[in-house]
């Protein structure tokens, strides 16, 4: 297989998995958090800086790159790796979530989705075959099947029809995939918040023998206990020898709880998005550095953090930069947030190796200001 999952150890406390995901552009130690580079760049960060904080893989977005610069231009450049000067693994999503969340006047049919660009209103169409064609051109190591992501809440009949369409689209994606020897195509389990639909989707997709499986349609506004319930229902029905990817999840509590429930890969725009608003994650909880009380605080964002930002700059300086609309301030908060989550996952992997992930979670939550449920 293009992508191969190697199970190293299962945590005796929790059942969490320590593994390695072998890809054409390198090995990913799992569980892993993937920084999101929507437009073929992680906002404000260079590839070299991402390597300094040991980001193992980044995610880029099919929908956005289809709109600009266009997948054919990326193909002509030699694929995403050359285009963005990143020689480590890349994952591209299918574009499905963006079509359903960003596009105006979308029209879903069995063939695909007709929609208007959020940029200029142009009428466009993406089918399962088109999504795979775009991702084949982009050249990521891991690509995703085109799926429909239902909103929360949604009635059962709508979710059932959506899930069944997602399964049919997955089969069409598999048939359209033209670069199986270079790119691994993952199926996406949907089914909303309905346990039986999740199980049915997992059963149908695993029968297609994809090299990996994502769990989509979570972290879309539902309470976190419900998300964890859906994971507990779904994950045991996914193959032990294939990677499991929880899409769109990146808060520290959810990374820990997802790892405990057997997830290997996560991604989210959260660390870069909140950084642009002057909010950072620290070992004792979130901190809004733009607040006035930090104007004369000359300590680091997090005294326990070893990132470039915390080793060199104070809360007062970063607040000044952000209040003055200086881009460097956002770069510093982004650097810190990404490092914080990547370092958290390093600690998660170490805790799995030492059979103490539940203890680590409880200790982390106590410092972060959360209880054992993550609240």
Image (cartoon, rainbow, N blue to C red):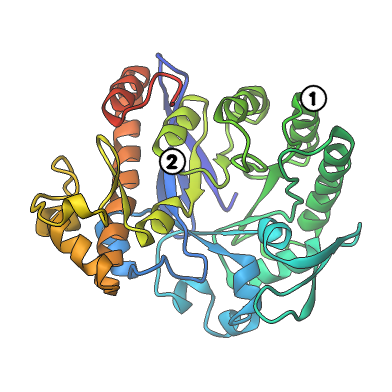
- Work out whether residue 320 or residue 165 is closer to the camera in this orientation and state it: 320
Q: Is residue 275 above or below residue 247?
A: below
Q: Position of residue 361 (x, y in %)?
A: 35, 24
Residue at position x 61%, y 71% from top? 64
Residue 274 relative to residue 340: left or right: right
Q: Residues within 10 Å of mark 1 (few under 14, many from 20)?
A: some
Sequence-earlier tag: 1 or 2: 1
Q: Position of residue 320 (x, y in %)?
A: 19, 66
Horizontal side of residue 28 vs 284, given as left or right? right
> In which quarter of the view is residue 233 placed?
top right
Mark closer to the observer (1, 2): 2
Name the residue at 44% across, 17% down: 14
Q: Residues within 10 Å of mark 2 (few under 14, many from 20)?
A: some
Apparent side of residue 37 relative to residue 138 in the rendered image (left or right): left
Camera-side residue: 307 or 59? 307
Residue 291 in picture, x, y percent from top left? 26, 53
- Mark 1 highlights which residue? 196
Left or right: 196, with 136 as reference point: right
Question: For the residue labelled by badge 2, is the local secondary structure a helix, a strand or a loop?
Answer: loop
Q: What distance separates the C-alpha of mark 1 from that of mark 2?
A: 27 Å
User: In which quadrant of the rendered image does the C terminus lie?
Assistant: top left
Q: Is residue 7 above or below residue 41?
A: above
Using the image, tell me which numbered label, if any, was put on residue 151: none
Which residue does the image show at 44% across and 36% down from the upper left?
255
Q: Nearer the viewer, residue 25 or 17?
A: 17
Residue 210 in the image, given as x and y percentages of width and height: 69, 44
Q: Quadrant of residue 202?
A: top right
> Which residue is farthest top?
13
Q: Which residue is mark 2?
A: 251
Local SS, label 1: helix
Residue at the far front in the pictured view:
292
Residue 321 sits in which quadrant?
A: bottom left
């Amino acid at each position: 297989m293009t992508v191969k999952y190697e199970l190293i150890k299962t945590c005796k406390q929790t059942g969490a998995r320590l593994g390695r995901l072998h890809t054409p552009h390198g090995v990913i130690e799992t569980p892993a958090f993937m920084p999101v580079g929507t437009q073929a760049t992680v906002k404000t960060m260079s590839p070299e800086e991402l390597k300094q904080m040991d980001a193992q893989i980044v995610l880029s977005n099919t929908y956005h790159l289809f709109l600009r610069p266009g997948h054919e231009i990326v193909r002509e450049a030699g694929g995403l790796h050359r285009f963005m000067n990143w020689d480590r693994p890349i994952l591209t999503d299918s574009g499905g979530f963006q079509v359903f969340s960003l596009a105006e006047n979308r029209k879903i049919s069995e063939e695909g989705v007709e929609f208007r660009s959020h940029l200029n209103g142009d009428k466009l169409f993406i089918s399962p075959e088109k999504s795979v064609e775009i991702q084949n051109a982009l050249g990521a190591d891991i690509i995703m099947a085109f799926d429909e992501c239902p909103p929360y809440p949604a009635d059962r009949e709508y979710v059932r029809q959506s899930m069944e369409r997602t399964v049919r689209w997955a089969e069409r994606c598999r048939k359209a995939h033209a670069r199986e020897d270079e790119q691994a195509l993952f199926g996406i389990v949907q089914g909303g918040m309905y346990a039986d639909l999740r199980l049915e989707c997992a059963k149908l997709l695993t029968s297609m023998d994809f090299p990996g499986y994502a769990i989509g349609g979570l972290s879309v506004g539902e309470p976190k206990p419900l998300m964890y319930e859906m994971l507990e229902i779904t994950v045991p029905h996914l193959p032990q020898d294939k990677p499991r990817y929880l899409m769109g999840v990146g808060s520290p509590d959810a990374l820990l709880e997802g790892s405990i429930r057997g997830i290997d890969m996560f991604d989210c725009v959260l660390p870069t998005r909140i950084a642009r608003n002057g909010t950072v994650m620290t070992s004792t909880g979130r901190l809004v550095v733009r607040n006035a009380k930090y104007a004369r605080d000359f300590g680091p964002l997090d005294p326990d953090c070893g990132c470039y930002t915390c080793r060199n700059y104070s809360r007062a300086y970063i607040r000044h930069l952000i209040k003055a609309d200086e881009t460097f301030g956002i770069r510093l908060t982004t650097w810190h947030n990404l490092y914080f989550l990547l370092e958290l996952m390093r600690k998660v992997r170490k805790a799995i190796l030492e059979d103490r992930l539940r203890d680590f979670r409880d200790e982390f939550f106590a410092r972060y200001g959360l209880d054992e449920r993550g609240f």
